[in-house]
């Protein structure tokens, strides 16, 4: 049902027929019946996995056991040649870490209230620290909020507030300690 809600009309038409559901009480289900149910379920999942456009849905990722990524371990903004670079450190480098496909970054100018949101696709490099050039920032305080994302969902955000001096060349930017949101 969750997959059907997530799919477009064209995708719903490509969904395989779902296995029949049993309303038999468990004490009446035989080994043969359970084997038949298992085979039908395996055929259903196989038919979905063979269609890449369906595999991208959160409901399928959940069914396959993929979980949303953990919160980024750290975020900092550093000056680079009169511009700025955002650095994001993932929560873990472990092979068992939850996959990260992209980062969602929100930059809020705290003085004007203007916000800019962008996504950074990281592909297979999601478990490594990431750097992104973000250009020159206006003087003043800026709040950076970063979440990790994959096809199963988004992590809690990690954020940092920085204060850009009026003359970037005269003063280096010091990023404050990052905040981790639970």
Image (cartoon, rainbow, N blue to C red):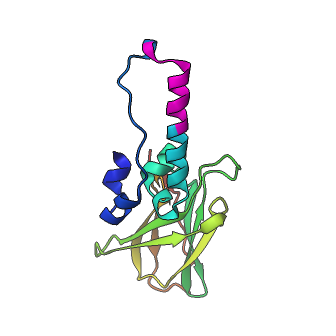
Instruction: Residue 35: say if magenta.
Output: yes
In this rendering, the answer to whether 82 lies above or below 7 is below
User: Which residue is drawn at the image coordinates 46% and 59% (left, top)?
Assistant: 54
The quadrant holding residue 163 is bottom left
> Is 100 displayed left or right of 16 in the figure?
right
Query: Of residues 34 and 75, which is closer to you in this image?
Result: 34
Q: Give the magenta-colored segment's residue range.
A: 28-39
Q: Classify the position of the N terminus by image quarter.
A: top left
SS assignment for the magenta stretch, majority: helix
The quadrant holding residue 100 is bottom right
User: Which residue is drawn at the image coordinates 71% and 50% (left, top)?
Assistant: 95
The x, y position of residue 23, in whole percent, is 35, 24
Q: Classify the position of the C terminus by image quarter.
A: top left
In this rendering, the answer to whether 63 lies above or below 137 is above
The x, y position of residue 180, in whole percent, is 48, 50
In this rendering, the answer to whether 41 lies above or below 154 is above
Q: Can residue 163 be spotted in the picture?
A: yes
In this rendering, the answer to whether 31 lies above or below 106 is above
Query: Of residues 78 and 90, which is closer to you in this image?
Result: 90
């Amino acid at each position: 049902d969750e997959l059907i809600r997530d799919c477009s009309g064209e995708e719903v038409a490509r969904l395989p027929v779902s296995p029949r559901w049993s309303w038999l009480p468990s004490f009446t289900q035989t080994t043969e019946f359970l084997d038949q149910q298992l085979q039908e379920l395996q055929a259903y999942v196989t038919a979905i996995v063979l269609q890449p456009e369906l595999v991208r849905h959160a409901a399928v990722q959940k069914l396959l056991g993929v979980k949303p990524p953990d919160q980024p371990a750290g975020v900092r903004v550093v000056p680079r040649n009169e511009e700025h670079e955002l650095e994001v450190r993932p929560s873990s480098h472990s092979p068992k870490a939850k996959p990260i496909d992209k980062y969602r970054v929100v930059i809020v100018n705290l003085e004007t209230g203007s916000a800019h949101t962008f996504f950074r696709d990281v592909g297979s490099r999601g478990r490594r620290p990431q750097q992104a050039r973000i250009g020159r920032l206006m003087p003043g305080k800026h709040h950076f909020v970063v979440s990790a994302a994959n096809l199963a969902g988004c992590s809690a955000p990690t954020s940092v507030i920085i204060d850009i001096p009026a003359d970037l060349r005269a003063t280096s930017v010091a990023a404050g300690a990052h905040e981790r949101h639970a």
